Amino acid sequence: MSKLPILSWRDVVKALSKKGFKVVRQRGSHLILEGPEHRFTVVPRHETIAPTTLLKIMAQVGITKEEFIKLLN
């Protein structure tokens, strides 16, 4: 298993948009994204996203670590 890269919130939103997720609203420093099948996830607007937070986002949207890394390219 490969390690997760250090990512900013912009990188995470860009990768999720490739899976069909769109920003539907913002509350404070958090973006709420909605995707296919009405899946929701929250992305904090931080310069670096903690790996544990990133793993939770991936679980919420239903993708594996390998799929997510492919979306980054």
Image (cartoon, rainbow, N blue to C red):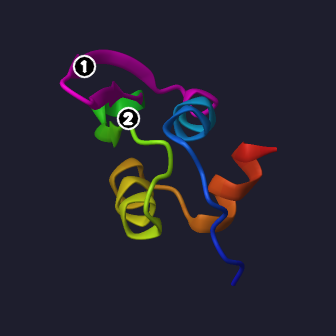
Total residue callouts: 2
Up the image or down, 13 lies above or below 22; here it is: below
Residues under numbered marks 2 and 1 in contact, where contact means CB atoms less than 8 Å apart: yes
Classify residue 10 as left or right of residue 35: right
Residue visible at 46% across and 53% down in the picture: 49
Q: Is residue 18 magenta?
A: yes
Crowd tier of the residue under label 1, counting other residues whose Cα lies within 10 Å: few below 14, some 14–19, many 20 or above: some
- Of residue 67 and residue 28, the one placed in the foreground of this image is 28
- Of residue 29 and residue 54, the one placed in the foreground of this image is 29
Secondary structure at numbered mark 2? loop
Secondary structure at numbered mark 1? strand
Residue visible at 41% across and 42% down in the picture: 46
Residue visible at 43% across and 65% down in the picture: 55
At label 2, which amino acid type do we have?
Arg
Q: Which residue is mark 2?
A: 45
Residue 40's label in the rendered image is: none
Up the image or down, 51 lies above or below 45; here it is: below
Up the image or down, 18 lies above or below 58; here it is: above
Which residue sits furthest right? 73
Image x and y of residue 9, in percent: 49, 38
Nearer the camera: disc 2 or disc 1: 2
Residue visible at 40% across and 29% down in the picture: 35
At label 1, which amino acid type do we have?
Gln
Image x and y of residue 73, in percent: 82, 44
Image x and y of residue 1, in percent: 69, 84
* First of labels 2, 1 by sequence position: 1
The residue segment tinted magenta is 17-35
Q: CA distance from mark 2 to mark 1?
A: 10 Å
- Of residue 53 and residue 71, the one placed in the foreground of this image is 53
Q: Is residue 58 magenta?
A: no
Image x and y of residue 50, in percent: 43, 62
Q: Which residue is mark 1?
A: 26
